[in-house]
Amino acid sequence: MRHNTNVALVSLGLLLGMGGCTSFLTGDKLSSTPNVPSSASIQQLFMGVQATQFALQEGQLAMQMCMWVQACGATGNRFVELSGRYNFTVASNVGANSGDWSLLYDAGGLVDIHAVEADAQAGGDSTWLGIARIWEALTVGTLADQWGDVPYSQIGTSATPAPDNQFAIYGAIQTLLDQAIAELQSNTGGGPGTADLIFRGNRANWIAAAYTLKARYFMHTAESLGTPAYQNAITAATNGISDNTGNGDFRAFHGTAPAERNMWAQFQSTSFGNDIEAGKPLTDIMNARTDPRLPAYFCLNTNNGYGGQDFNAPQPAATISNFGCPSAPVRFSATFRVPYVTYGENELILAEAYKCRASTLPCTGTTATATADDPTALIHLNNQRTYVNTLYPASAPQVALPQLAGITGAQLLDSIMTDKFVLMFQNIETIMDYRRTCLPAIAPVVAGNTLGFKNVPGQLFFPLIEIDANPNVPNQSTELATHNFRTRGDVHACTNDNAP
């Protein structure tokens, strides 16, 4: 496996080769190899981990998945639009995501997360250890979600680690989160305090977030495992984030200085920022309900409304919204704390799990039959709607989301996943929801799709930097020939079978 000596925080501009900046979060070089102890303090290491994972969760990968589920669109016929049209290879940074690969594994990623854990254990600080393990779970989960079978168990002992089974990794994540919860419940050690940019060391908030993450990753096995996975998700989410004001949400931290800003805001300031636009499926859904979040998500178009781009059918520029107007939408403002794990997600996990745990697999479309759990699922769907109205008070012409009543079966599942599609805007998790349920129904990109994908791609290629250094990871041809270019846990034909 390739390791480097990059500074932990890599801004999106640097990832895209447009010139980067140093960060207020860390100005120190962090560890450069997993086999050599870091000379940086645990606080420096932890700051670097947070900064790097903010860049990962909000950067190039998030932008690409936003386009693949068509919550975002793109124009300009440059790398952004090409990525949205599934044009990517092992040699491309977008698509193979070599920059993101480094953020996950190298300095500020697993290298330094493991160093923080080692320092916390040596110092007997269970609070810090528990928080670091939650970060590891999110980092490794992102890897497994997007690349499937990936190196993990051998990364500290082998220069050419073999990939682990994706389901084994999900099992390891559950163990990590159980350990994290136990460490935090022990109430031992001072923890990071204000160096924790998420919850300032608040154990109860971290425990709740860990349970919601457990529920998320149980759901990632539901396509294959069915009822047991849904039941495990219900058990975990019942202990998950319960603060419906948003104060218990796991959100990033950003400042106003150029390198401290929300990564989506940073992208808007680069030469490619205007290439990314709103996606038509998302704006159509939100316009149909006059959603209260419209002005927080998008700029008004020149027709004084909100509209999105369809990759398959060009629209007049006047009808399309973007994110780069002079008064940026809240979600693209410099200091907006992008949500990673929230009460709203927790409630919709409960809604989907109750809806699907007694349904025939796959739980989508006509297979989502009405069950005795439908009323409970509806309660959690409506809880999420109350939360949205609290965070985004409606201002005319937008209106508050109404409470839903009397819906069951496939209609209920469609309502749950449509609400989640809107809620999870800017979150990498949206692609996992789509792969699992095929909802909302989106038309795979055909126009300009030169690689010939017939459906939304189901994974990423291993980047060339890893293929060149590690003979144990598959090359592009092998990946395309295996499981129809989708990850082990992804079994629904609607998303990505019939790969080229």
Image (cartoon, grey):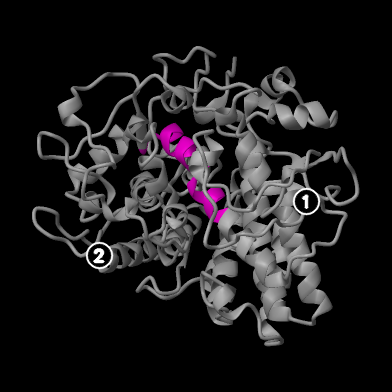
422 to 190, vertically: above or below: above
Q: In terms of sequence position, does the residue under pointer 2 or pointer 1 come before the other?
A: 1
Horizontally, is 322 left or right of 187 in the view? left
Which amino acid, by three-letter code, is at mark 1? Answer: Ser
| Distance from the alpha carbon under mark 2 to that under mark 1 | 45 Å
Horizontally, is 325 left or right of 250 in the view? left
Q: Which residue is mark 2?
A: 389
400 to 204, vertically: above or below: above
Badge 2 element: helix
Q: Nearer the viewer, mark 2 or mark 1?
A: 1
**Residue 384: which quarter of the image?**
bottom left
Residue 96: where, in percent of width, then height?
Answer: 62, 30
Q: Is residue 66 a member of the stretch shown in magenta?
A: yes
- Mark 1 closeness class: few <14, some 14–19, many ≥20 residues within 10 Å: many
Residue 226: where, in percent of width, then height?
Answer: 61, 49
Magenta span: predominant SS is: helix
Which is nearer the eye, 232 or 264?
264
Which is nearer the eye, 471 or 334?
334
Q: Which residue is mark 1?
A: 32
Horizontally, is 355 left or right of 458 in the view? left
- Mark 2 closeness class: few <14, some 14–19, many ≥20 residues within 10 Å: some
Q: Is residue 259 visible?
A: yes
Which amino acid, by three-letter code, is at mark 2? Answer: Asn
Residue 273: where, in percent of width, then height?
Answer: 36, 36
Q: Which quadrant is the C terminus positioned in?
A: top right
**Residue 143: which quarter of the image?**
top right
Q: Is residue 55 a member of the stretch shown in magenta?
A: yes
Badge 1 element: loop
Q: Which quadrant is the N terminus positioned in?
A: top right
201 to 403, vertically: above or below: below
Which is nearer the eye, 154 or 256?
256
**Boundaries of the magenta span:** 53-71
